[in-house]
Amino acid sequence: MNNSHIISANNLSFSYNGETVLENVNLTINENDFVWIVGPNGGGKTTLLKLMLGLLKPKTGSIKIFGDSPQKARRYIGYMSQHILLDSQFPVSVLDVVLMGRLGNGRSVGPFRSADKEIANEVLQQVGLLEYRQKQFSQLSGGQQRRLLIARALVSRPKILLLDEPTANLDADSEKDLFELLKKLNKELTIILVSHDPAFVSDFVKRVVCVNRSVHEHPTTEISGSYVSEFYGDQRRIIQHDKHLEED
Amino acid sequence: MIEFFSAVAEFSFLQKALLAGVLAGVACGLVGPFIVARRISYIGGGIAHSVLGGMGAAYFFSNVFNWNWLHPLYGAVVAALLSAIVIGLVSLRAKQREDTIISAIWAIGMAVGIIFIMKTPGYNENLLSYLFGNILMVSSHDLWQIAGLDLLIIAMVILFYNKFLAICFDEEFVRARGINVEFYYLLLLCLTALTVVVLITVVGIVMVIALLTLPVAIAGYFTRTLWQTMILSTITTIVLTVFGLALSYNLDLPSGASIILLAGFLFLITIFGKKIVAIFTSK
């Protein structure tokens, strides 16, 4: 096994109640990759993500993160969940939300320590939300909430960042801000992002993986000028779904 | 009001009632905010009503077999914890028909309790005090038990505040951090169960859920974080119980119902007050 492979799935299969969701998945992810996982609803994107997080166990085959089981490698992974808020008035401050990312890191009972709060402040600074730290979560805009959830994933000092539908219901400007942030983070982190948006991906994504029961990797090709930039206001790439990359 | 406080200085049953109100306020203020934030007040209602089964059984066995040690409060604790765990497991595992199962436990618990109480020989004035509370009948023994439950609730909330908050906010994320979400969720429901037991002495089974949610809803209008909500709703509950008691003493009204009516009234004032303030400040 190549050492630069930080995640490797070998003949990975998974099924819910006898129905196969993922079949014979082989996938390797390298350090500092920016991987976009696309696919139709029910195609198995989220299942693949949950297998990487160790929330599900493979039926057959294996998945290794830094050569270990996902449960053991948990501390290397920062996770941005597809967050659904039950109560729009949920009484929680920005700082409270970031600190949730420190759970499972240090002391398991009692209040957070000052070291935890220092890291939380650093990360809030990094995503540009430090001045909002005493605000209530619900007072933030949609784009700010997403950045906060990224901060929560970063506060455990991970090496891999997993994001589940980070751009869902975001306007174009907030989406652009979010990608600028991810681009900056990608210099130090491996980023894996799940989205159902099948056609267009931002121009700094390095690999596109399509999950629909099986897994295929597509090349991204730049399309020059044309109507795409007219619609989106910046340059994007289009995935060629008819061409598959050979296994490397 | 002055009349009430001079009566408090004179009568020990009023002192005990006030003390019970303060102790209930603490339990309520610490646990209520989690229930409101996680939107599980229906689960709280289910636990509260099923408690009658345990109280009725304890009442029956202590009378029929002369088990004088078997205080109805013990039956309440056992039934509350049992139904918290059953309802909790159902809500974690069976995603469908969760409300149907909670309703079933709610009604079955009450049915068991009513049968036991009705089959207990003698005159059963207890049923009414279980259902609607009787804070004026609180004994020193009851107070010690409530204080013990309070201490347990305080300790648990201090130890696990961060985890409870995170689980109420985003269960999936906490699970991915490698934390046993099921365990802490059930623990939170068990604390809810103990709080319900504390509150039953004050307002009775039927009105527990109002005291568990209304002060939190009122406090929620003025606070940004969960611990602020806890402090303010604790104070709100204590104030409501004191004034509710005074009201019931002066006008000779049932105490539990007076407290709840006052809570409902304050809740409405808060909603409309906020709206009116918003209208004036926006101009």
Image (cartoon, coloured by chain):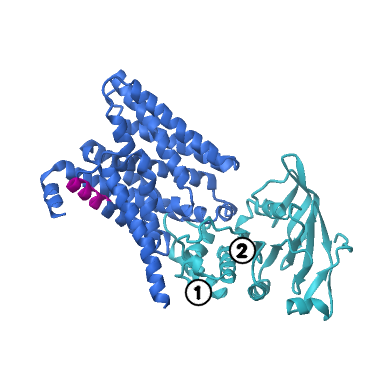
**Residue under pointer 2:** A158
Q: Residue most toward the bottom? A: A225
The residue range painted magenta reads B241-251
Q: Which chain is the one coloured cyan?
A: A
Q: Position of residue A161 (x, y in %)?
A: 65, 63
Residue B240 vs residue B185, the one in the foreground: B240
Lateral position of residue A48 relative to residue A150, left or right: right
**Given the image, on which type of amino acid does mark 2 rest?**
Pro
Q: Which chain is blue?
A: B
Q: Which mark is residue A130?
A: 1
Residue B250 forms part of the magenta stretch = yes
Task: Answer yes or no: is residue A202 visible.
Answer: yes
Is B89 left or right of B237, judged from the image as shown? right
Magenta region, mostly helix, strand or loop?
helix
Q: Label 1 is found on which chain of the structure? A: A
Residue at x-position 63% and y-position 74%: A174
